[in-house]
Image (spheres, helix red, strand yellow):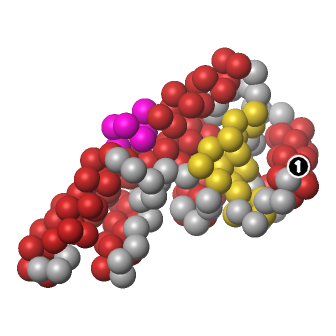
């Protein structure tokens, strides 16, 4: 079962959107996927109308997205929270499926692909260089540091999450390189 992030609107008609997200989860489960909808879960104990709590909930959702193999995006227009989720999925090369009207699908794929082209490829290049140089540990250290720095900048500036969390993601990638695997899947 693929762990699947459910990306759909939460704000606006809040109750209706939560019910829809639950339906999307059921649909994903019926398709043999393991759905994860942070906005359904976190709203059980986070006050979405409180800006600080909402921000925390969004950041937690982005952390969970990093563990998913698939993101399913539903809706008619992209909210600010959805934008960040789609962009992070593009950076991390997470498989994407989009459901909605043609203009919505086009918009979502544009966000995803822009993140992939402008942010993921440079990170992959650094990761590949670091992996190639790993046999000579002193040579790999500056490349790993540069990959970590680049990822921190990309994550903090473009995805609007806390620099500490960005640093943690950089460390996860560096550790995956040290262990001979990579979180950055696919070709450059």
At x 70% / y 45%, what residue is drawn?
Answer: 72
Provide residue 147's location: percent of width, then percent of height. Answer: 25, 61
Of residues 117 and 154, the one drawn nearer to the viewer in this rendering: 117
- 30 on left or right of 2: right
**Where is residue 104, by image quadrant?**
top right
**Image quarter of residue 74:** top right
Q: Main secondary structure of the magenta part?
A: helix
Return the x and y of residue 133 as percentages of the image width and height.
16, 71
The residue under label 1 is 27
Q: Residues within 10 Å of mark 1 (few under 14, many from 20)?
A: few
> Which one is nearer the viewer's eye here, 175 or 46?
175
Residue at image position (56%, 42%) is 86
Q: Residue at x 62, y 61 (%)?
A: 68
User: In the displayed structure, would residue 176 be above or below residue 7?
Assistant: below
Residue 129 occupies quadrant: bottom left
Boundaries of the magenta span? 114-119
Camera sees residue 165: no
- x%, y% of residue 132? 20, 68
Judge left or right: residue 4 versus residue 168: right
In screen coordinates, is 147 left or right of 48? left
């Amino acid at each position: 079962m693929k762990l699947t992030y459910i990306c759909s609107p939460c704000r606006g008609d809040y109750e209706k959107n939560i019910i829809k997200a639950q339906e999307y989860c059921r649909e994903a489960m019926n398709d043999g996927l393991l759905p994860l909808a942070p906005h359904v879960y976190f709203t059980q104990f986070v006050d979405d109308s409180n800006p600080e709590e909402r921000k925390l909930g969004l950041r937690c959702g982005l952390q969970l997205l990093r563990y998913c193999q698939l993101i399913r995006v539903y809706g008619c227009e992209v909210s600010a929270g959805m934008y960040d989720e789609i962009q992070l999925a593009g950076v991390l090369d997470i498989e994407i499926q989009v459901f909605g009207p043609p203009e919505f699908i086009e918009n979502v794929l544009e966000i995803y692909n822009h993140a992939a082209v402008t942010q993921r490829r440079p990170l992959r290049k650094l990761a590949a260089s670091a992996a190639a140089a790993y046999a000579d540990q002193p040579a790999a250290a500056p490349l790993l540091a540069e990959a970590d720095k680049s990822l921190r900048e990309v994550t903090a500036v473009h995805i609007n999450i806390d620099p500490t969390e960005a640093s943690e993601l950089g460390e996860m990638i560096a550790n995956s390189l040290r262990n001979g695997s990579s979180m950055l899947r696919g070709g450059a």
